[in-house]
Amino acid sequence: MVDTGSGKIRVDKWLWYARVVKTRSRAQNIIKTGKVRVNSTRISSVSSNISVGDVLTIALERQIKVLKVQAPGTRRGPAPEAQLLYEDLSPPPSKKEDIVWSTDTVAVRDEGAGRPTKKQRRETMRFRENAARSDYDED
């Protein structure tokens, strides 16, 4: 059921109800680390309350979501029900063709070459570690 009332709800519960994160403990973790903003204000308290009309900005691992709260919700229901809890204001994701991949950070393999050998995997790991170290050195 979707509660359309104007009641308040804890942010961690709402993130879980809206299926933004898989577990409530994950929701609490991203709030504690400061990755959630309510109406442009960073929150660090898990027990912060939100209400209808608030705009949440959530920094997830590979994307940033901007969600406007439409309803507080009463349970973690199926995905179609969860989508009724918010309006997604996030910018559309960029197309894969638009992403420019740098050849110095991506291991290149011939198509159809099969599974890499143990030696090739170790070389790839060393390559990635060196690339990551050089990224830190540039800062």
Image (cartoon, rainbow, N blue to C red):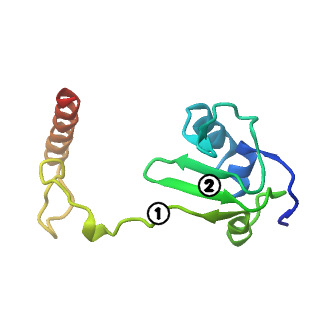
What residue is shown at x 62% (from left), y 55% (from top)?
A: 20
Q: In which quarter of the image is the C terminus?
A: top left
Q: Mark 2 points at which residue?
A: 20
Query: In this rendering, would 108 be left or right of 20?
Result: left
Tag 1 near tag 2, CB within 8 Å: no
Q: Nearer the viewer, residue 68 or 15?
A: 68
How far across and how far down the image is residue 14, in percent? Answer: 73, 51
Q: Is residue 103 above or below residue 3?
A: above
* Amino acid marked by disc 2: Val
How far across and how far down the image is residue 5, in percent? Answer: 88, 60
Of callouts 1 and 2, which one flags the residue occurring earlier in the amino acid sequence? Answer: 2
Q: Which one is in front in this view, the residue at disc 1 or the one at disc 2?
A: 1
How far across and how far down the image is residue 131, in percent? Answer: 17, 38
Q: In which quarter of the image is the N terminus?
A: bottom right
Give the structural element (helix, strand or loop) at label 2: loop
Q: Is residue 100 above or below residue 8?
A: below
What residue is shown at x 85% (from left), y 64% (from top)?
A: 4
Give the structural element (helix, strand or loop) at label 1: loop
Q: How many labels does the image show?
A: 2
How far across and how far down the image is residue 70, in percent? Answer: 74, 62
Q: Dot 2, crowdedness within 10 Å: few (<14), some or many (≥20)?
A: some
Q: Nearer the viewer, residue 38 or 28?
A: 38
Q: Which mark is residue 91?
A: 1
Query: In this rendering, would 46 be left or right of 41?
Result: right
The Cα–Cα distance between marks 1 and 2, rounded to whole angstroms, is: 16 Å
Q: Dot 1, crowdedness within 10 Å: few (<14), some or many (≥20)?
A: few
Q: Residue 36 carries which label?
A: none
Query: In this rendering, would 13 be left or right of 130?
Result: right
What residue is shown at x 26% (from left), y 62% (from top)?
A: 99
* Amino acid marked by disc 1: Pro
What residue is shown at x 71% (from left), y 43% (from top)?
A: 12
